[in-house]
Amino acid sequence: MERTKEEAAVFWAVHCLDHPDAANRRAAARAEHSARLARLRDTGTGPRVLLYGPLLGPDGETQVGSLFLVEAGHLAAVEDFVDQDPFSTGDVWGVVDIRAFTPSGNSVVTLPVTPETPEPRRPPTPI
């Protein structure tokens, strides 16, 4: 499914925490998970994943979850993205929290310019 202008309108923070006993399942699904993210990026289909990576435990090394910043037009598209991920189908993630996200105009980082978003993405100025 190709993105439309309407689908490129909202940012979503996706915070996933692994089941406590998921380390082996995470390792087994990692290659498929990474390949899927690369495929989505290369084909431009589905939600646009702007940023992602593992969440780490207190030791700074053990992977205990995943974090994504996603651009999509509606919550259902993000839920579908999560539901089809190998970490989801492989029972790695125990808790998934999806929230709409508005970047602050004071952020050091601005979101990338694309054909769908020709200007740097900033939140609307409050009245």
Image: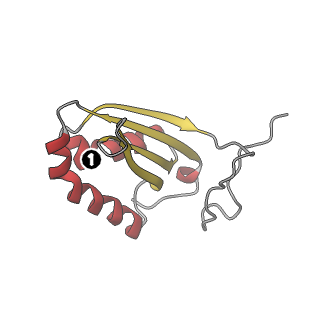
| Amino acid at pointer 1 | Gln
Judged from this view, the residue extending furthest toward the front is 59
List the residue tagged with mark 1: 84
Question: Residue 34's image quarter?
Answer: bottom left
Tag count:
1
Say how the picture is coloured: secondary structure
Determine the residue positioned at 80% across, 41% down. Answer: 125
10 Å neighbourhood of mark 1: few (<14), some, or many (≥20)? few
Looking at this view, is 16 or 48 the one in front? 16
State the quadrant of the C terminus. Answer: top right
Judged from this view, the residue extending furthest toward the right is 127
Determine the residue positioned at 69% across, 52% down. Answer: 108
Residue 106 vs residue 101: left or right? right
- Residue 118 at what x, y percent from top left? 68, 65
Determine the residue positioned at 40% across, 56% down. Answer: 46
Q: In this view, does 17 lie above or below 32?
A: above
Residue 83 vs residue 101: left or right? left
- Residue 64 at what x, y percent from top left? 31, 38
Q: In this view, does 30 lie above or below 55?
A: below
Determine the residue positioned at 27% across, 48% down. Answer: 85
- Residue 76 at what x, y percent from top left? 41, 39
Question: Residue 11's image quarter?
Answer: top right
Helix, strand or loop under label 1: loop
- Residue 45 at what x, y percent from top left? 40, 61
State the quadrant of the N terminus. Answer: bottom left
